[in-house]
Image (cartoon, helix red, strand yellow):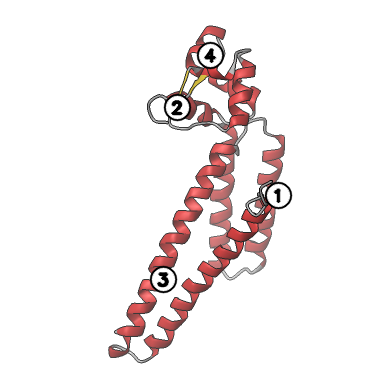
């Protein structure tokens, strides 16, 4: 599964730390998600998408490399 | 990050004080140190804003525990079997130790099976479909 968390974060000018605080995870988890090393749970994926005021399928793309 | 460093420092101090207590045979020192240290870490986690435990760390813990149980069970059972089979040529007592190790491995597997069924039940694995 691929994601566009880094792109959205850059667009909104949000730091990894602020995103982590907003969705209730550690900064290391945000880093792991951005690098594609960790696929978040459905709940966390929804939280991240809502934080960016975007649809979950806009932020997380299923069916690409490493799914 | 700051919270993590403080936690590591507290754990190091606890380790050092427990070691000193054991070496100097001061019985109350390890107990007091462990209790105080546990309380300090708990307070730090409550007050700290930084999230140290989340779903990713939960998965890491699950995987690490499963791997540790697998490796330990395999190691203990293999060592026990070796001691039961060939250990007696070195010392007759090794047979008893071998049995104990193999039973330890079996006990661990049974405990794992019990918890497996418990969590399977808790998480709805036994629910009948409609």
Q: Are marks 1 and 3 on the same chain?
A: yes
The image quadrant where one finds the N terminus of chain B is top right
Q: Is residue B113 above or below residue A4?
A: below
Label 3 and label 4: CA atoms lie apart by: 49 Å
Under tag 2, what secondary structure?
Answer: loop
Question: Label 4 marks which chain's residue?
Answer: A
| Camera-side mark, 2 or 1 | 2
Residue on which the image places disc 3: B76
The disc placed on residue A1 is 2
Q: Are marks 1 and 3 in contact (CB under 8 Å)?
A: no
Q: Are marks 2 and 3 on the same chain?
A: no
Point out the tag, 2 or 4, that comes first from the N-terminus.
Answer: 2
Q: Tell me what residue is drawn at x 53 percent, y 43 percent.
A: B59
| Camera-side mark, 2 or 4 | 2
| Residue B43 position within the rendered picture, expressed as x and y whole percent measured from the top left | 71, 42
**Outermost residue, bottom side:** B92
Residue on which the image places disc 4: A9
Under tag 3, what secondary structure?
Answer: helix
| Camera-side mark, 1 or 4 | 4
Point out the tag, 1 or 3, that comes first from the N-terminus.
Answer: 1
Q: Is residue B37 above or below residue A37?
A: below
Residue on which the image places disc 1: B39
Q: Are marks 1 and 4 on the same chain?
A: no
Choose between B28 and A34: the one closer to the eye.
Answer: A34
| Residue B32 position within the rendered picture, expressed as x and y whole percent measured from the top left | 68, 59
| Camera-side mark, 2 or 3 | 2
For the image, the number of numbered tags is: 4
Q: Would you call the spot at circle 3 few (<14 residues within 10 Å), some (14-19), or many (20 or more)? A: some
């Amino acid at each position: 599964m691929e994601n566009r968390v880094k792109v959205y974060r850059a667009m909104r000018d949000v730091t990894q730390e602020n995103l982590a605080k907003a969705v209730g995870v550690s900064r290391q988890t945000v880093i792991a998600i951005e690098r594609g090393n960790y696929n978040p749970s459905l709940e966390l994926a929804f939280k991240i998408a809502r934080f960016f005021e975007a649809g979950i399928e806009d932020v997380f793309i299923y069916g690409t490399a490493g799914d | 990050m700051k919270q993590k460093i403080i936690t590591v420092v507290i754990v190091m101090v606890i380790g050092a004080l427990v070691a000193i207590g054991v070496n100097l045979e001061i019985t109350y020192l390890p107990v007091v140190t462990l209790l105080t240290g546990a309380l300090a870490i708990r307070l730090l986690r409550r007050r700290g804003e930084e999230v140290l435990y989340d779903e990713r760390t939960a998965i890491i813990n699950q995987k690490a525990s499963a791997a540790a149980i697998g490796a330990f069970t395999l190691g203990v059972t293999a060592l026990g079997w070796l001691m039961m089979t060939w250990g007696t040529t070195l010392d007759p007592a090794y047979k008893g130790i071998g049995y104990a190790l193999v039973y330890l491995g079996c006990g661990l597997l049974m405990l794992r099976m019990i918890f497996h069924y418990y969590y399977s039940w808790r998480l709805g694995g036994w629910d009948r479909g409609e």
